[in-house]
């Protein structure tokens, strides 16, 4: 299982944020993945400037899928001008959680 955290441009309207999220979900599912959790954090202050932005729109997705899917996500996010930053990590279960 993987965690995908991405930060998108805060000036995107709600409809554009939802459309971006749906595109990411479609990308994961079409690559053989399955989304297990979606957590929308919304607009938050950035620790430092990113492309002249002081805020970003945060979304955390947990998904299962083949490792090759991570490379495809990375490639797509690099060319998407609305994604400021992203990070994919292996999900670590919480203490006492059933796996």
Image (cartoon, rainbow, N blue to C red):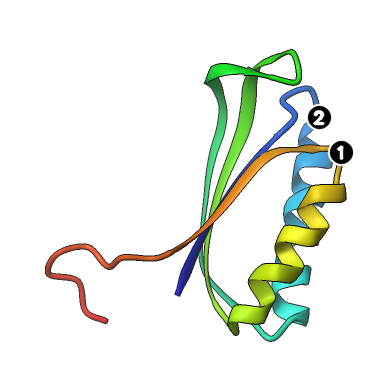
Residue under the image location 70 percent in, 72 percent down = 28
- Residue 1 appears left or right of 28: left
- Residue 58 appears left or right of 14: left
Q: Nearer the viewer, residue 45 or 19?
A: 45
In contact (CB < 8 Å): disc 2 and disc 1 = no
Q: Nearer the viewer, residue 91 or 22?
A: 91
Q: Quadrant of residue 91?
A: bottom left
Q: Which secondary structure lies at badge 1?
A: loop
Q: Residue 14: which numbered mark, if any? A: none
Query: Circle 1 is placed at which residue position?
Result: 81
| Residue 52 in picture, x, y percent from top left | 74, 13
Residue under the image location 77 percent in, 70 percent down = 27
Q: Residues within 10 Å of mark 2 (few under 14, many from 20)?
A: some
Q: Is residue 31 above or below residue 6?
A: below
Q: Which secondary structure lies at badge 2?
A: loop
Chain-order first, disc 2 or disc 1: 2
Mark 2 vs mark 1, foreground winner is 1
Q: Is residue 60 above or below residue 84?
A: below
Which quarter of the rendering shows the C terminus? bottom left
Q: Is residue 5 above or below residue 11?
A: below
In the orientation shown, which residue stands out farthest toward the left?
96
Q: Is residue 1 above or below residue 15?
A: below
Q: Nearer the viewer, residue 36 or 80?
A: 80
Residue under the image location 82 percent in, 58 percent down = 76
Which quarter of the rendering shows the N terminus? bottom left
Query: Circle 2 is placed at which residue position?
Result: 12
| Residue 3 in picture, x, y percent from top left | 48, 61
Estimate the spatial distance between the alpha carbons at disc 2 and disc 1, rounded to whole Å.
11 Å
Q: Residues within 10 Å of mark 1 (few under 14, many from 20)?
A: few
Residue under the image location 82 percent in, 37 percent down = 82
**How many numbered circles are shown?**
2
């Amino acid at each position: 299982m993987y965690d995908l955290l991405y930060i998108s441009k805060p000036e995107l309207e709600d409809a554009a944020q939802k459309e971006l999220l749906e595109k990411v979900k479609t990308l994961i599912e079409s690559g053989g993945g399955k989304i297990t959790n979606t957590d929308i954090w919304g607009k938050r202050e950035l620790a430092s400037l990113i492309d002249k932005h002081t805020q970003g729109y945060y979304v955390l997705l947990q998904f299962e899928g083949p490792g090759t899917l991570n490379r495809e996500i990375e490639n797509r996010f690099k060319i998407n001008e609305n994604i400021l930053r992203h990070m994919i990590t292996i999900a670590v279960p919480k203490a006492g959680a059933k796996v």
